[in-house]
Amino acid sequence: MALFSSNTFNSLALVLSLSIILNLLPSSFASNKRGIPQSDVDLLEFPLNLEYLEAEFFLWGSLGYGLDKIAPELTGKGPEPIGAKIAKLDPFVRDVVAQFAFQEVGHLRAIKSTVPGFPRPLLNISSESFATVINSAIGRTLEPPFDPYANDINYLIASYVIPYVGLTGYVGANPNLQSPAAKRLVAGLLGVESGQDAVIRALLFEQAYVKVKPYGITVAEFTDRISNLRNELGHAGLKDEGIVVKPSEGAEGRISGNVLAGDKDSLAFGRTPEEILRIVYGSGNESKPGGFYPKGAEGRIAQSHLRLNEALLNFN
């Protein structure tokens, strides 16, 4: 005999959800010492999860070491990333990636100097982690396993996986921000993150129809499959496009090249924190950690979903 009926379980889930929301409400109207509302603090802290991920991936990929050497004060003594290593890159790509890496260090500093922030979460940027993402995107297990650190093209494809997600998060957060300081910070972050994404997409677009060895899959198809996967995991419709689309889906419905992704008016897509968590966890569920965040993301927003999941599991 079942311990709970489905109606009882659904009611319990609703009560637990409301409880967490009510616990968050009182502080959502509070202000920190900088006069930034707590709701803005939450939205500014959440992207730290993505900024930590990008910083470590780009630092290790280009230089062979990460935040613990470059800016240990920004780590908050959080755990070192899993599987990080230097990539086999030509001098040009290595220099571009190194530029991205140092930009991400600046982003971390800018956010943590504005809001309290949190220590670096446990990150999994191993070859195996990226291979899992690529296998899910392609729909089969590639042999040999996809290795993001093996060469330029693999690293650029792996880089395609990350910055765009953070970019859409900043776009999604912007209309919900209240304070001028928060809006100014997000605008500055969004500008550089958008630039990084554009550079990555342009470098990939230059080789759009090159087949990635030894898989026989073109660069354009890799980006299309990754974008489709992110759309599926996000559960919020089309907010992602590869570097080549049908002409009817390109800018003004007239061109297939898609160096910059955007809606029908070429405006950037936005995502909520929940959509982002579903994608970076690789689970399609904001309460089920995994993927690049084995123990989940940090911050009040991410942790509220993890607490809800734990509470529900305790009642099973």
Image (cartoon, rainbow, N blue to C red):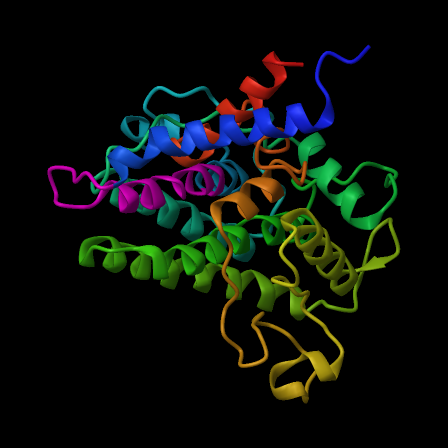
Q: Is residue 66 left or right of residue 203?
A: left
Residue closer to the observer: 114 or 277: 277
Residue 173 versus residue 135 in the image, above or below = below
Determine which quarter of the picture holds residue 280. top right
Q: Give the image location of residue 115, x and y in percent.
A: 23, 38
Q: Is residue 217 left or right of residue 224?
A: right
**Residue drawn at point x = 25 percent, y = 40 percent:** 38
Q: Give the image location of residue 96, x and y in percent.
A: 48, 55
Residue 155 versus residue 7 in the image, above or below = below
**Residue drawn at point x = 55 percent, y = 22 percent:** 295
Q: Give the image location of residue 185, x and y in percent.
A: 26, 55
Residue closer to the observer: 149 or 303: 303
Can residue 235 be seen here? yes
Determine which quarter of the picture holds residue 125. top right
Whether 201 is among the magenta residues is no
Location of the N terminus by quadrant is: top right
Determine which quarter of the picture holds residue 277. top right
**Residue drawn at point x = 42 percent, y = 42 percent:** 51
Can residue 65 be seen here? no
Q: Is residue 291 left or right of residue 196?
A: right
Query: Which contiguous range is marked in magenta?
Result: 29-54
Whether 49 is among the magenta residues is yes
